[in-house]
Amino acid sequence: MDSTRFHNHIESPRLLSGEGTSRIRWVLIFWLFVLSAISYLDRVNISIAGSSLADEYHLSQVRLGWVFSAFLLGYALFQTPGGWLVDRFGPRRVLTVGVVWWGIFTALTASLPTKVWGAVFFFMLVRFLLGAGESIIYPSSNQFVSQWIPTRERGIANGMIFAGVGAGAGIAPTLVSYVMNHYGWRASFWLSALIGMCAGLIWYLIASDKPEQHPFVNSSELALIRESRAAISESSVAGIPSRPEPSLVSKITWRSIITSKSILAVTASYFCFGYVAWIFFSWFYIYLAKVRGMDLKASAFYSTLPPIAIVACSLSGGAINDALTRSFGKRIGRCGVAFVGLLLAAVFLLLGSRAASPAVAGIVLSGGAGALYLSQSSYWSVTADIAGDSAGAASGFMNMGAQFGGALTASLTPAIAQRYGWTSSFLVAAVLSIVGGLAWLLVDPERRLIPIMKVAP
């Protein structure tokens, strides 16, 4: 968009608040919440429909675990390339293509005829490619946050985006169960695909990569965003010009990303986070039904509790993150919240897995999911803070760790449960949650990655 067109639109009075400042950044953050919810609906619907799918194709729980892991493997392997793509082409186009991609492969999950040889390999391939498409959702959102959201608002912004995780996972049990009961399990995948494609089209129509490119961002909102960018630039690592000369541009290299102590620490912590989170996304519904003996209705009800806790704690964790950061700095606000949240999650996992009552177990374990997500905004806020324009690449590398953790739990959890019992599966998750919390002690949220300076063309 040329500058004349931009300045002809930014003063539109219809889009100003009472204080004369537009709020377009929050409209787009809300739509990222919607896309986040849809992405989780598309990825966890198979955990609800999984029993029906497994019965129809004669798959054991272990083989069903392979299908779960295939998604996470594709999701993990394409995090880093996805981060590079969004840094290169921007979140508007990359995320739109990604949403269409994952809609196609969600629909394909329900396309295989029943009597066919090698069904498990087909499902593994389709879910792998679905994971590859969904890999761009959070690197895209983090690149958007780095460009659009002042640093003091990044906790709550990321909290809102990741509240979509809980919303999507919370909608899935009720929606998928209803559609399965009335139209069959295949229809639940087709509906998920249609919803996603419609939401992706809306994103393409309303979004832009940077606030300067958006026709409805007024001068007051733009000044607020630019003020935060200037403050971050002034606090850059010593030895790098705080305001580069007009003839210079800065670039963060892959080497600086993968050798950063802070990035490696949050990646290791996020591996642990992903392992714990995917117990809830992959196995919680099946655990309640098969292990705790709940019927379909009760399993569906208690399966909505972790997502509700995730929504509440993503939002509250983000707000606490920002409040403590403003009052005490990023080490307390970013790192402290994550450290406490992960340790609390371990406590809930240990207590819930040992509860005698199925209802109490469902409630307490759901509290563990909520405690875990108190830390969620910290991961993404820190990578946006320290990586700047390369937030997509840095957060994609970090998120790769979480998805390898999730892929491991998708297959390892039933294997541990089969050999040692489900209590042992939750014990392993609790130990990893503690390790993930301790890793935050190695993170320095104030030290930005060092860019190299190049002459602009």
Image (cartoon, grey):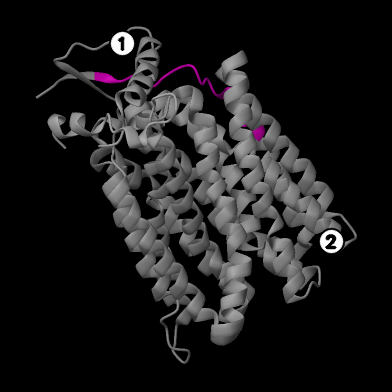
Specify the quadrant of the image occupied by residue 387.
Answer: top left
Specify the quadrant of the image occupied by residue 336.
Answer: top right
Mark 2 nearby-residue class (10 Å; few <14, some 14–19, many ≥20): some
Seen as rendered, the residue at the extreme bottom is 115
Q: Give the mark, 1 or 2, whose residue is nearer the N terminus.
A: 1
Work out whether 360 lies above or below 454: below
Q: Nearer the viewer, mark 1 or mark 2?
A: 2
> What's the amino acid at mark 2?
Ala
Which residue is under mark 2?
359
- In percent of the image, x 54 and y 56: which residue is there? 407
Closer to us: 98 or 254: 98
Mark 1 nearby-residue class (10 Å; few <14, some 14–19, many ≥20): some
- In percent of the image, x 35 and y 30: which residue is there? 147
Magenta residues, as a range? 437-452
Q: Is residue 200 left or right of residue 361?
A: left
Residue 320: % across, % down = 63, 28
Secondary structure under tag 1 reads: loop
Residue 215 in sight here: yes
Which residue is under mark 1?
240
Residue 62 in sight here: no
The reply to whether discs 1 and 2 touch (Cβ–Cβ < 8 Å) is no
- In percent of the image, x 80 and y 51: which residue is there? 364
Residue 69: % across, % down = 52, 62
183 part of magenta stretch: no
